[in-house]
Image (cartoon, grey):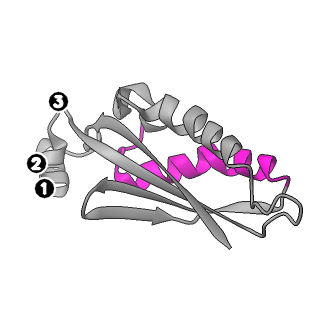
Amino acid sequence: MLISKKVEFSAAHICRAPGLSEEENRRIYGEAANPHGHGHNYVVEVAIEGEPDPVTGMILDLKELKQILEDRILSVYDHRLLNREVEAFEHRVPTVENIAIDIWRRICQPVASVTRGRARLFSVRVHETSDLVVEYRGAE
């Protein structure tokens, strides 16, 4: 069984790889390579896989999941310039793909801890725009 929770945050990023020339960055990232950045209203969906506890009927306590998402995602990402204010992107381009991977790394262990191994993080979906979504299911 899967249970999903959504959170939203607003953030800016600059899609530029430092090892590439101005022309290469513009060719690869287009307008997103603007050195002044641009912003999005991101929607993040996390899905937890597990079986409901026979006593509580829940896969996990949703209050605990909400707190993890606030502490590990919203407090880190909301209203930030990701390239300069989120350590994971000091040397990595904050593409939507890399954002999904970073969010997975931030919440995977805390989710396992609050479920005491009865459930696991199944996927992280990051909606950068209404028509662009990335889903990450962890490293193989």
Magenta part of the chain: 90-116
Q: Are marks 3 and 1 in contact (CB under 8 Å)?
A: no
* 25 vs 132, nearest the viewer: 132
Check if residue 134 falls in the magenta segment: no
| Picture residue at 46% right of the left edge, 65% below the top | 135
Asked whether the residues under the numbered discs 2 and 1 touch, taking CB atoms below 8 Å apart as contact, a structural biologist would say: yes
Q: Amino acid at mark 1?
A: Arg
Q: Which residue is mark 1?
A: 27
Secondary element at image label 3? loop
Residue 37: % across, % down: 20, 34
Number of the front mark, 3 or 1? 3
Q: Amino acid at mark 3?
A: His
Which residue is label 3 attached to?
Answer: 36
Quarter of the image containing the N terminus? Answer: bottom right
The foreground one among 119 and 52 is 52
What's the residue at 41%, 25% (across, down)? 85
Q: Assess disc 1: are there few (<14), some (14-19) or many (≥20) residues with their C-alpha within 10 Å of its C-alpha.
A: few
The CA distance from mark 3 to mark 1 is: 17 Å
- The label shown at residue 23 is 2
Mark closest to the chain's N terminus, 3 or 1: 1
